[in-house]
């Protein structure tokens, strides 16, 4: 396996080097709003001579824009966060299949669309955080979050949040809709407050004492380990964490990824860009620059991410999980998860 990966990486490097004098451009539609991604773009431009033109915005707005532009869309690539949005783009007809030996070899099958219309390039684990002074026996599984012993203890985001939508869709994949509905109702019953804010706000809820348990993605906490996050970093020592369901399916992973636009005018450049994102250099920077987990196995982790510890990730096929997203939203509505 190592020999194969090394050969693929060498071939990719040769491909990039061979296009160093290439002319052309790449039109990138991105809802990733991280300043640290700038290096990803500049390194690609320097390696290939291809100029990246960026349009950034809300994922749903970008998808709607691509639909409205139709065959005249200048978009070559759509990058966005979470499986739900990637699947939404596929359902909207704004992506196309990509046949790439590099992507097939580098990106695990469960982190890409069954029809190769989207690919995951980085991940965040959705885990359980808790106040170490108040919770001596924290939840160890996602199912535990619905246990009545945690009534009034939990901070978690709204049902409109894509991270939660995909989490519930994955619970459906592992069990069934009835089990997922009972779980969602149990979590609603255990909420310390109505859902509000982003993942960092759930962690701040621990610090403020509004709740003793919070559900959030790892990179929000890892950022507080690496940099100063107001209302969080100064109190991070009071916070413990659990990677859930380690004796079962493993910790749920939210995905960041992309695909080639349905009417990409610069398709060859688009393929090259996706292959570049699957390379070791870009994969390492997803972790070092934005505290994410690489999608490619064996790539090194940033110190802040490594400090969270090793764990078993859920390797459920995310393309299958995506099929359960409508059911997840229906269940959220049924249990009045605001």
Image (cartoon, rainbow, N blue to C red):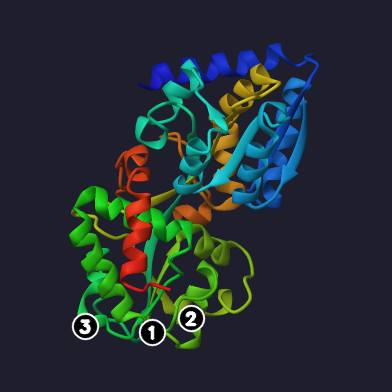
Name the residue carrying label 3.
149
Q: Position of residue 204 (x, y in %)?
A: 52, 78
Q: Around disc 1, counting alpha carbons within 10 Å, would you say few (fewer than 14), some (14 to 19), or many (20 or more)? A: many
State if disc 2 and disc 1 touch (CB < 8 Å). yes
Q: Quadrant of the N terminus?
A: top left
Query: In the shown orientation, is residue 176 left or right of residue 220?
Result: left
Under circle 3, the secondary element is helix
Q: CA separation, marks 3 and 1?
A: 13 Å
Q: Around disc 3, counting alpha carbons within 10 Å, would you say few (fewer than 14), some (14 to 19), or many (20 or more)? A: few
Q: CA separation, marks 1 and 2?
A: 9 Å
Q: Position of residue 145 (x, y in %)?
A: 27, 71
Name the residue carrying label 2.
205
Q: Residue at x 32, y 48 (%)?
A: 324
**Earlier along the polypeptide chain: callout 3 or callout 2?**
3
Name the residue carrying label 1.
192
Query: In the shown orientation, is residue 20 left or right of residue 250?
Result: right
Under circle 2, the secondary element is helix
Q: Around disc 2, counting alpha carbons within 10 Å, would you say few (fewer than 14), some (14 to 19), or many (20 or more)? A: many
Q: Residue at x 42, y 75 (%)?
A: 239
State if disc 1 and disc 3 touch (CB < 8 Å). no
Q: Is residue 194 above or below residue 116?
A: below
Q: Position of residue 208 (x, y in %)?
A: 50, 87
**Earlier along the polypeptide chain: callout 1 or callout 2?**
1
Q: Is residue 21 above or below residue 195?
A: above
Q: Quadrant of the C terminus?
A: bottom left
Whether residue 59 is visible: yes
Query: In the shown orientation, is residue 151 left or right of residue 127?
Result: left
């Amino acid at each position: 396996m190592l020999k194969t990966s090394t050969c693929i990486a060498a071939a990719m490097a040769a491909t990039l080097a061979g296009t160093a004098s290439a002319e052309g451009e790449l039109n990138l539609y991105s809802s990733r709003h991280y300043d640290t991604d700038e290096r990803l773009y500049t390194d690609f431009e320097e390696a290939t001579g291809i100029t990246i033109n960026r349009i950034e915005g809300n994922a749903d707005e970008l998808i709607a824009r691509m639909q409205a532009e139709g065959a005249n869309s200048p978009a070559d690539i759509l990058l966005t966060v979470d499986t739900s949005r990637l699947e939404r783009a596929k359902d909207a007809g704004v992506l196309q299949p990509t046949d790439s030996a590099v992507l097939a070899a580098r990106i695990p099958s469960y982190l890409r669309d069954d029809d190769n219309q989207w690919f995951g390039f980085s991940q965040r684990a959705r885990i359980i955080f808790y106040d170490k002074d108040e919770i001596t026996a924290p939840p160890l599984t996602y199912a535990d979050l619905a246990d009545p012993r945690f009534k009034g203890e939990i901070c978690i985001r709204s049902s409109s949040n894509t991270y939660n939508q995909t989490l519930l869709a994955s619970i459906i994949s592992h069990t069934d809709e009835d089990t997922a509905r009972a779980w969602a109702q149990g979590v609603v019953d255990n909420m310390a407050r109505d859902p509000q804010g982003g993942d960092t706000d759930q962690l701040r809820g621990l610090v403020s004492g509004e709740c003793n348990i919070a559900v959030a993605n790892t990179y929000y906490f890892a950022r507080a380990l690496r940099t100063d996050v107001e209302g969080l970093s100064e109190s991070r020592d009071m916070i413990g964490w659990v990677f859930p369901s380690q004796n079962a399916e493993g910790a749920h992973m939210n995905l960041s990824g992309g695909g080639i636009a349905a009417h990409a005018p610069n398709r060859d450049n688009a393929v090259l860009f996706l292959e570049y994102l699957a390379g070791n250099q870009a994969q390492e920077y997803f972790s070092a620059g934005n505290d994410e987990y690489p999608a490619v196995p064996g790539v090194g982790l940033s110190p802040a991410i490594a400090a969270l510890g090793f764990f078993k990730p859920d390797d459920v096929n995310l393309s299958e999980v995506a099929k359960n997203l409508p059911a997840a939203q229906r269940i959220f509505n049924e249990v009045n998860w605001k």
